[in-house]
Image: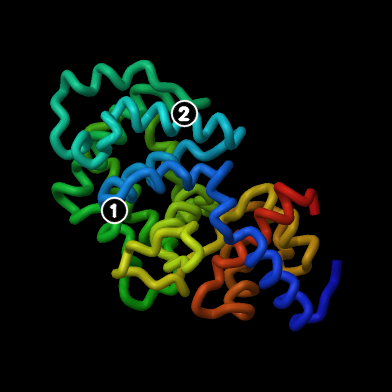
Amino acid sequence: MKLKKGELKAFLDEKAFQYNQPKFLEEDPIQIPHQYAIKEDIEISGFLTAIISWGNRKMIVKNASRMMKLLGNSPYDFIINHKDKDLHDLESFVHRTFNGGDLQQFVKSLKHIYDVHGGLETILVPSDGYSDYKEAINSLKNAFFEIPHPQRTTKHISDPLKNSAAKRINMYLRWMVRNDKTGVDFGIWNQHNPAHLSCPLDVHSGKVARKLGILNRQQNDWKAVSELDTSLRKFNPTDPVLYDFALFGLGVFENF
């Protein structure tokens, strides 16, 4: 499907408007952090939900809800004040390859992030001079695992410096950073600039982007993310990831 630039922007704007609506919350994992009002609860529940966001969306929502229940439905309080004995209750958790041991480590590492690095919002701020989150995501991973940890858990945080598309963390950043007027994304991270966000690239969004001619690279990796960034920022320099809704909706709901 080849459209002129003006026609393509109009098409994507229309689709983004169609899907960037409260109804989007009904089946999407973003509904989990929407259950909370405290900033830290929103960002922690959102982070943990995003980390397990692969596979069937209904199962993601079900397991993320279970995870929040295991954290007493007060994730920030649990993270900051947990004792070693509290971690035992997390052993039963499993979502695909993310198991109870991984969740226990994530709780420990998140406490470290808040105690030592100022929290998730601070650790993920891009350094001056950077226009995307490539280095910031790498910094998060380094800080996350600078305390003792099982090696297997490191696979659950992607690293763009190793050319990973980091789809789940880019999705999480969209949730936290975009100041969304429709009530879907939160926009609670005021230290961040939505112009720096990258589209969460997966099978669906990649397929649609290639069909529309705004992505040529065939692998879904960080090089492809950067190429897609370039295309989407031409359409909307201040809020390029608005078009995630269009690409996702076209791919998942319309089988475009």
Give me the disc on residue 63: 2
Q: Is residue 3 visible?
A: yes
Residue at (85% x, 71% y) in the render: 2
Apparent side of residue 63 relative to residue 90 in the rendered image (left or right): right
Q: Is residue 164 visible?
A: no
Residue at (39% x, 64% y) in the render: 187
Say if 139 sits above or below 12 in the image. Answer: above
> What amino acid is at disc 2?
Asn
Residue at (42% x, 31% y) in the render: 65
Instruction: Find numbered disc 1 in the image and state the secondary structure of the residue it sits on.
Output: helix
Question: Looking at this rendering, what residue extends furthest in the right direction?
Answer: 1
Residue tagged 1: 120
Apparent side of residue 76 relative to residue 213 in the rendered image (left or right): left
Q: Nearer the viewer, residue 88 or 37?
A: 37
Mark 1 Cα within 10 Å, few/some/many (few <14, many 20+)? some
Residue at (65% x, 74% y) in the render: 231
Say if 219 sits above or below 75 in the image. Answer: below
**Where does residue 230 sit, x and y in percent of width and height?**
60, 74
Apparent side of residue 247 relative to residue 138 in the rendered image (left or right): right
Q: Nearer the viewer, residue 51 or 185?
A: 185
Where, quadrant-wise, is the N terminus in this rendering?
Answer: bottom right
Kindly report which numbered mark, 1 or 2, lies closer to the viewer in this rendering: 2
**Where does residue 125 sit, x and y in percent of width and height?**
32, 65
**Where does residue 134 sit, x and y in percent of width and height?**
44, 61
Mark 2 Cα within 10 Å, few/some/many (few <14, many 20+)? some
